[in-house]
Amino acid sequence: MPSRKTSSDVTFFHPFVVPGCSDELPEGDYEVLAHNEVMLSYSIAAYRRTASLY
């Protein structure tokens, strides 16, 4: 199945917690990667997010 990857840079000004992580992460700049799979139909192509990584 075709897929695409996108990345974004985000800045957090305060420490934060990500569900599933046991530690609090410090403020700062982070790169977020997103993996999307294409959902094919007869009329349009749409993408579904399958993973987000930091």
Image: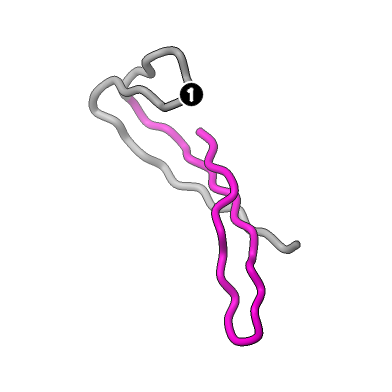
Q: State the residue in front, 26 or 18.
A: 18
Residue 30 image-quadrant placement: top left
Q: Is residue 9 above or below residue 30?
A: below
Return the residue found at the far bottom: 43
Residue 42 image-quadrant placement: bottom right
Q: Position of residue 9 (x, y in %)?
A: 41, 42
Q: Is residue 2 left or right of residue 52?
A: right
Residue 2 image-quadrant placement: bottom right
Magenta part of the protein: which range? 28-54
Could you tell me which residue is drawn at 55 percent across and 53 percent down? 49
Could you tell me which residue is drawn at 48 percent across and 24 percent down? 20
Q: Is residue 34 left or right of residue 15?
A: right
Could you tell me which residue is drawn at 37 percent across and 31 percent down? 29
Q: Is residue 41 above or below residue 20?
A: below
Q: Which residue is mark 1?
A: 20
Q: Position of residue 6 (x, y in %)?
A: 54, 52
Q: Is residue 26 in the magenta section? A: no
Question: Dominant secondary structure of the magenta stretch?
Answer: strand
Q: Is residue 44 above or below residue 12?
A: below
Return the residue found at the far left: 13
Return the residue found at the far right: 1
Q: Is residue 29 above or below residue 50?
A: above
- What secondary structure is found at the residue carrying circle 1? loop
What amino acid is at disc 1?
Answer: Gly
